[in-house]
Image (tube, rainbow, N blue to C red):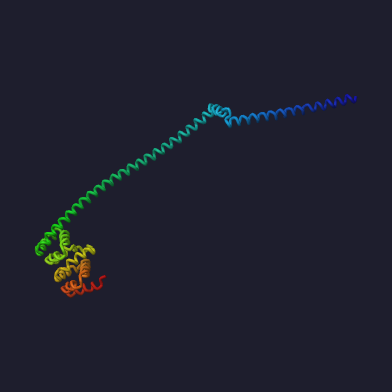
């Protein structure tokens, strides 16, 4: 009885251990499988990653042949074509805008060149005319300075009626002593016009004053006084009278003032003392 019971207990224990042994075998097999899989996967990854035996090249070739890869490449190609077309269109617009600006600049440049040519022609023409006038003035002055002062004065008076500026230029080109003799034989009212001071708004610079001073210092004081008194009614002309008298030496200016009326002499003397 006892042996039978022991045998039964052993059988029951053996029966309980069989499933556990099977489970252990399964676990062990699974672990071995996982280990082999990981080793194989790692070896495959290394082979592809480092392109061992051309594995990566071969795999890329296979992937490119798949429908998904072809679709992706086609989509990328289409997208790039759109980008390139947009870039080309933008560049074309920039090109057209630059060409338009260039055309405008070329037209402006042509207009400027035309204006420069026109101005050059005008300057050349004016220079030629000015030179011609200067030559005529010198020739006319050379004739007058060798004439009798009374005859020369008549010619200058006639010239005043046609070209007062020419008459003034001619007188300025003649030596001051000869010009003074001619001026003494011209009516005072015409002398004022001759000197180019009939316009009350006209300004006279230092060079003009110097020319007038040289002329008046050789004119008869009575004639000079008469001319100056005719100029005193206009403020601008009167200022010119004071400037000329101030530029003359004291003896000459005193002789001219002494031949003026008492009122004008007093006015001039007062202005000279205040003149700076």
Where residue 233 appears, as percent x and y from the top left, is 19, 68
Say if residue 35 shows up in the picture: yes
Q: Residue furthest right?
A: 1
Instruction: Name the one closer to the observer, 248 or 155.
Output: 248
Say if residue 264 shows up in the picture: no
Q: Residue at x 26, y 48 (%)?
A: 116
Instruction: Name the one closer to the observer, 70 or 153.
Output: 153
Looking at the image, residue 102 lies above or below residue 213: above
Task: Determine the image quadrant of residue 139.
Answer: bottom left
Q: Residue at x 87, y 26 (%)?
A: 6
Where residue 206 appears, as percent x and y from the top left, is 23, 64
For the N terminus, the image quarter is: top right
Instruction: Name the one closer to the observer, 219 or 53.
Output: 53
Mark count: 0
Whether residue 10 sits left or right of residue 47 in the image: it is right
Q: Residue at x 11, y 66 (%)?
A: 185
Where residue 165 appears, as percent x and y from the top left, is 17, 59
For the C terminus, the image quarter is: bottom left
Where residue 211 appears, as percent x and y from the top left, is 19, 64
Looking at the image, residue 169 lies above or below residue 51: below
């Amino acid at each position: 009885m006892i042996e039978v019971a022991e045998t039964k207990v052993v059988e029951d224990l053996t029966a309980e251990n069989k499933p556990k042994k099977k489970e252990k075998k399964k676990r062990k097999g699974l672990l071995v499988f996982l280990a082999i899989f990981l080793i194989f996967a790692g070896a495959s990854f290394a082979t592809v990653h480092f392109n061992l035996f051309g594995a990566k090249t071969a795999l890329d070739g296979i992937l490119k042949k798949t429908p998904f890869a072809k679709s992706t490449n086609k989509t990328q190609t289409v997208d790039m074509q759109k980008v390139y077309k947009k870039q080309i269109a933008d560049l074309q617009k920039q090109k057209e805008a630059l060409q338009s600006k260039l055309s405008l600049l070329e037209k402006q440049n042509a207009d400027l060149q035309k204006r420069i040519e026109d101005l050059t022609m005008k300057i050349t023409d004016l220079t030629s005319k000015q030179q011609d006038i200067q030559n005529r003035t010198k020739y006319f002055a050379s004739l007058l300075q060798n004439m009798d002062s009374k005859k020369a004065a008549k010619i200058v008076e006639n010239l005043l009626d046609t070209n007062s500026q020419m008459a003034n230029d001619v007188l300025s080109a003649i030596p001051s002593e000869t010009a003074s003799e001619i001026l003494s034989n011209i009516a005072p009212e015409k002398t004022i016009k001759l000197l180019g001071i009939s316009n009350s708004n006209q300004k006279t610079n230092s060079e003009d004053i110097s020319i007038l001073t040289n002329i008046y210092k050789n004119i008869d004081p009575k004639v000079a006084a008469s001319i100056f008194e005719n100029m005193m009614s206009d403020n601008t002309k009167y200022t010119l009278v004071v400037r000329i008298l101030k530029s003359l030496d004291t003896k000459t200016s005193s002789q001219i003032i002494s031949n003026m009326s008492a009122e004008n002499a007093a006015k001039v003397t007062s202005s000279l003392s205040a003149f700076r």
